[in-house]
Image (cartoon, rainbow, N blue to C red):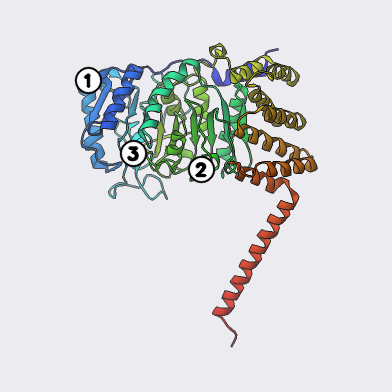
Amino acid sequence: MKNILSLLAAVVLGTMAHALVPQDVVVVFNAESELSVRTAEAYCAKRGIPRENAVGLHGIKAADISRADYNRFIMEPLMEEAHVRGWQWPANNKMLGKRKAAIVLMPDMPLRIKAAANLPQQLAGSGNNSASLDSELMLLGALYPLGGPLPNRAYKKDGNISDYDAHILAVCRIDAPDELTIRRMVNDPAEVERRGLWGWAVVDQGGPYPEGDAMFKTAASYAKVQGFPLFNETSKQCIGPDFPLSPHVAVYLGWYSQWPNGPFAATAPKFSFEKGAVAYHLHSFSALSVKDPKQWVGTLLQRGAAVTAGNVAEPYLGGCLDPEIFFARLLRGYTVAEAALMATPTASWQGVVLGDPLYRPFAARKSASVADNAFTRWYRACRDSSASLDALEGQVVSNLRRQDGAVVAEAFAWHCAETNRLDKAADYFRMAAEMSTAPADWTRNMLLQITVNYNRGEKTLAEAQMTRMLEQTMGSPYRKAIEETADTVVEERRKAKAAAAAAKAKAAAEAAKAKKTAKNPKK
């Protein structure tokens, strides 16, 4: 019988009809910024984009521009360049020439088109009629109302973007808080896609709206059936403070915190993604600035991600890039530009996508022979196990003596936890911890083992393990994560924490009562 991995993989992967090519992409840069010019030259050279596809714009002075300046310095020059160079923008099929499918913006291009008093509100209750430059350019060449977000006719499509009449451009940008990160965004994708992007998938569910959580839950299922080792946080909390994630995280999809938190917080121990990683945290204001390392997009890029996305202002959930569709299209082998276009519900709104538009992180994934590491071996083990836990365990055991056997043990432990085999999960987290050589890996697997033991009813064992771990890790950089787990597992700590919270609430109530009495003393 066809194994379940292959069966479900067909739903996600299917057959990719088209891939964006360098000739389809127009590179737009700020001609008055040395960084923008340098990056445009480097990107064109890296991807073999014809020199005539690069357009330098003048008169750009700020990240936020007016609608009039957008028209004067960006929209009108691009329309003129298309006419001179014989291009056709998708939204204007009356133009003659070679149709261009994507624009990539270089550093120091404006981010936002400011609200204008003489335009209607973009969305009832939004309080502004602004838009990201990127989202506005999706409709370059079209005549359209400026009073609200417009439906993206490419949303949820699957196939050659010229085969359906979407009349819309794919738009990405390459920019980040520092030039080193910008250079990585140019160089890493072309290198990584030759062997494919391999590593952990981390999905952090538990946001405020069920419809959003459904997207992340489905994305997690895609990761699992596609043979990614899956770290799946399903609680209502984000990943905890200072939690020691693996340095081999290839995919991160999470929500819902305004500021980078958990392992991504500025105060957390240094964490870096796998080279070429795709990382997306959904929040309404995650890209207020792409230059600010305190914003989600800046943080994720500085920590090694090659691709991310965000919003420059409130888009509401229905206007955000859909993580389920984005991940599914990338898995089919589409480029970042195509996958993002198909995952974006609206145009003339608030979204931005950062990364190389031609990057195909998973196109090589169907051929696991391109690399031999713990992640490709886990992929093959899942593929060949015919959905049998015993068969999968047999393949895992055969890998335990390898130098990177801890990765396979941890992947299997998570698989067992996901299928409610908590006894096996605890056992393999223990093995992974024993085989780990890096403090972060040992700490993570110990905490996961203790948590699983606690959840399967072995509370005495979990408490003893946690007490011992507290004694062993006094100087650990992951102490906050350790103590957070201890607050749940160790009964005395839990009781003390509850008592402290009750005492604080009582003191606050007494203070409020005293304040009220002081204001209204009895006569």
In the image, 280 versus 11, the foreground residue is: 280
In this view, 391 is above or below 245 = above
Provide residue 503's location: percent of width, then percent of height.
67, 63
Viewer-proximal residue, 156 or 286? Answer: 286
- Residue 181 position, x and y percent, is 40, 31
| Image quarter of the C terminus | bottom right
Which callout, 2 or 3, points at the residue further toward the start of the chain?
3
What secondary structure is marked by label 2? loop
What residue would you read off at disc 2?
A: 265
Element class at badge 1: helix
Residue plotted at (51% across, 19% down): 332
User: Where 206 sits versus 425, above or below?
Assistant: below
Tell me whether circle 2 and circle 3 mark residues in contact (CB < 8 Å): no
Q: Residue at x 44, y 37 (%)?
A: 297
Q: Residues under labels 1 and 3: Cα distance? A: 26 Å
Please rate how many residues cluster around mark 2, counting C-alpha atoms within 10 Å: few if below 14, some from 14 to 19, many from 20.
some
Can the viewer see residue 57? yes
Which residue is painted at 63% across and 15% down in the image? Answer: 380
Q: Amino acid at mark 2?
A: Ala
Three-letter amino acid code of the residue under disc 1? Arg
Q: Residues within 10 Å of mark 3 (few under 14, many from 20)?
A: many
Q: Which residue is mark 1?
A: 85
Disc number placed over residue 111 in the picture, else none: 3
Rendering coords of residue 478 (x, y %): 60, 41
Residue at 29% from the left image edge and 32% from the top image edge? 35
Mark toward the start of the polypeptide (2 vs 1): 1
Look at label 3 and name its amino acid: Leu
